Image: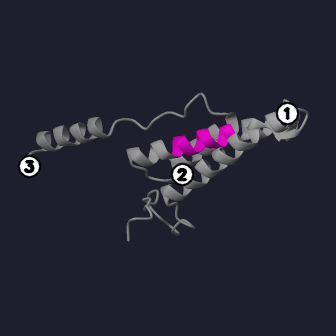
Amino acid sequence: MSTGAAIRTEERLMAESGPKPKTPKHLRPPTRDFYARMQATYSMEEHQERTLLLACEAYDRCVEAREELAKSGTYQKGRYGQAVTHPAVKVEEQARLAWLRCIRELGLPDEEPAGAPRPPKLHGRYVG
């Protein structure tokens, strides 16, 4: 293969892979930092990047519900004066479960290999 062909092939591969996605602006600052650290630490495929984004959004939703519960309280008076749980309790619960499922689906390694020359490749739970 000539040098020109090798350069064109490399340029084509770079164009196909595209630039790394930027940190989403709609995430809260601590979650944005977590997202950026994960992007920098691990080599992810597109579906894993999307799963990470969903995990971060779920975490933000959980924090948002927790803040609402801190303001309003866990219980409210119902229509007939009975105590009912605040709707944010369910939102917090569902967001927490979504966060845990997304993180589990990413299959993050327990610890990074010592002296790794590049970020470790992620392995899902279905890969042996």
Whole-angstrom CA distance, mark 3 to mark 2, is: 43 Å
Tag 2 or tag 3, which sits nearer the N-term? 3
Helix, strand or loop at label 2? It is helix
The relative height of residue 80 versus residue 58 in the rendered view (above or below) is: above
Query: In the rendering, at what x and y percent does residue 91 appear?
Result: 69, 40
Which quadrant holds the C terminus?
A: bottom left
Q: Residue at x 59, y 28 (%)?
A: 25
Residue 1: numbered disc? 3
Q: As displayed, is residue 8 above or below residue 110?
A: above
Q: Which residue is mark 1?
A: 78
Magenta residues? 52-61
Lateral position of residue 62 relative to residue 117, left or right: right
Q: Tell me where residue 122 appears, x and y as whole percent.
A: 44, 59
Does the magenta-highlighted stretch encompass residue 24?
A: no
* Residue type at the position of mark 1: Gly
- Horizontally, is 45 left or right of 28 in the view? left
Q: CA distance from mark 2 to mark 1?
A: 34 Å
User: On the image, numbered disc 2 is attached to which residue?
Assistant: 102
Type of the residue with mark 2: Cys
The overriding secondary structure of the stretch rendered in magenta is helix
Q: Secondary structure at mark 1?
A: loop
Crowding near the residue tagged with mark 1, few <14, some 14–19, many ≥20 C-alpha atoms within 10 Å: few
| Between discs 1 and 3, the one toward the N terminus | 3
